[in-house]
Image (tube, rainbow, N blue to C red):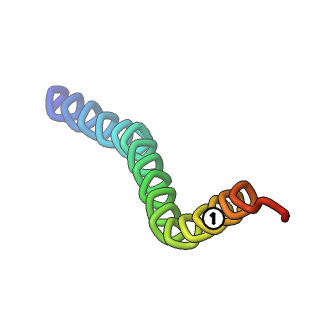
């Protein structure tokens, strides 16, 4: 009977420790943050690309303008 009680207590204690363990949760949180950053980067890349192209076009036009 004592062996059964000891097994029960250690099994319950092990199960409770596994439920309290948050190590796996950290990995999931970091993965979600990375996914969010990638999605934002993909969503804004066409807009940023057009803006940068516009700036360079204006700079090139300004440099090639002789002002005569």
Q: Position of residue 52 (x, y in %)?
A: 61, 61
Q: Secondary structure at mark 1?
A: helix
Vertical position of residue 5 compared to residue 62: above or below = above
Residue at the front extreme, as displayed: 68
Q: Which residue is mark 1?
A: 57
- The residue that appears at 39% across and 43% down in the rendered structure is 27
Q: Nearer the viewer, residue 38 or 23?
A: 38
- The residue that appears at 44% across and 58% down in the rendered structure is 38
Q: Position of residue 7 (x, y in %)?
A: 19, 32
Q: Nearer the viewer, residue 21 or 62?
A: 62
Q: Nearer the viewer, residue 4 or 63?
A: 63
The quadrant of the picture occupied by the C terminus is bottom right
Q: Position of residue 67 (x, y in %)?
A: 84, 63
The quadrant of the picture occupied by the N terminus is top left
- The residue that appears at 42% across and 58% down in the rendered structure is 35
Q: Nearer the viewer, residue 50 or 23?
A: 50
Q: Position of residue 48 (x, y in %)?
A: 59, 65
């Amino acid at each position: 009977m004592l062996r059964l009680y000891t097994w029960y207590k250690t099994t319950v204690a092990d199960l409770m420790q596994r439920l309290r363990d948050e190590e796996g949760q950290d990995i999931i949180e970091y993965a979600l943050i990375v996914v969010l950053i990638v999605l934002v980067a993909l969503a804004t890349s066409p807009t940023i690309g057009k803006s940068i192209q516009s700036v360079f076009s204006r700079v090139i036009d300004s440099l090639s303008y002789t002002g005569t």
